[in-house]
Amino acid sequence: MLVMDHSNLSDVNRSKPAGSKTIVKLFGEFDPMGDTIISDPYYGGIDGFEKNFRQVERCSEAFLAFLGFGKQ
């Protein structure tokens, strides 16, 4: 399961049933630029949404490559 920030990470890990084998990671760990936290763009105006979009796009491409579906 991929989450956007440390608060999400804590919430999900705390909510997992005992014995769960679910792996929870920050989606931003896939960001090749090293920006591990994907911030809520709501309060950043249009610039916040643009920054968020670029980061999610980078993370998505890297995650797909990790799964073996990268650009060829």
Image (cartoon, rainbow, N blue to C red):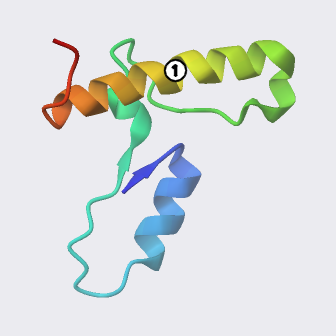
Which residue is at 41% across, 39% downward? 27
Q: Is residue 53 left or right of residue 50?
A: left
Q: For residue 63, which quarter of the picture? A: top left
Q: For residue 33, which quarter of the picture? A: top left
- Residue 25 versus residue 45 in the image, above or below: below
Which quadrant would the C terminus be assigned to in this image? top left
- Residue 49 versus residue 15 in the image, above or below: above
> In the rendered structure, which amino acid carries the disc numbered 1?
Gln
The image position of residue 64, as x and y in percent, is 26, 32
Q: Is residue 28 left or right of residue 55?
A: left
- Looking at the rendered structure, the number of numbered marks drawn on it comes to 1
Name the residue furthest front: 72
Which residue is at 34% across, 32% downward? 29
Q: Is residue 20 left or right of residue 46?
A: left
Q: For residue 20, which quarter of the picture? A: bottom left
The residue that label 1 is drawn on is 55
Name the residue furthest bottom: 18
Mark 1: few/some/many CA within 10 Å (<14, 14-19, 20+)? many
Seen from the viewer's position, the closer of residues 7 and 3 is 3
Seen from the viewer's position, the closer of residues 32 and 13 is 32
Seen from the viewer's position, the closer of residues 63 and 14 is 63
Which quadrant would the N terminus be assigned to in this image? bottom left
Which residue is at 22% across, 85% downward? 19
The image position of residue 40, as x and y in percent, is 70, 36
Q: Secondary structure at mark 1?
A: helix
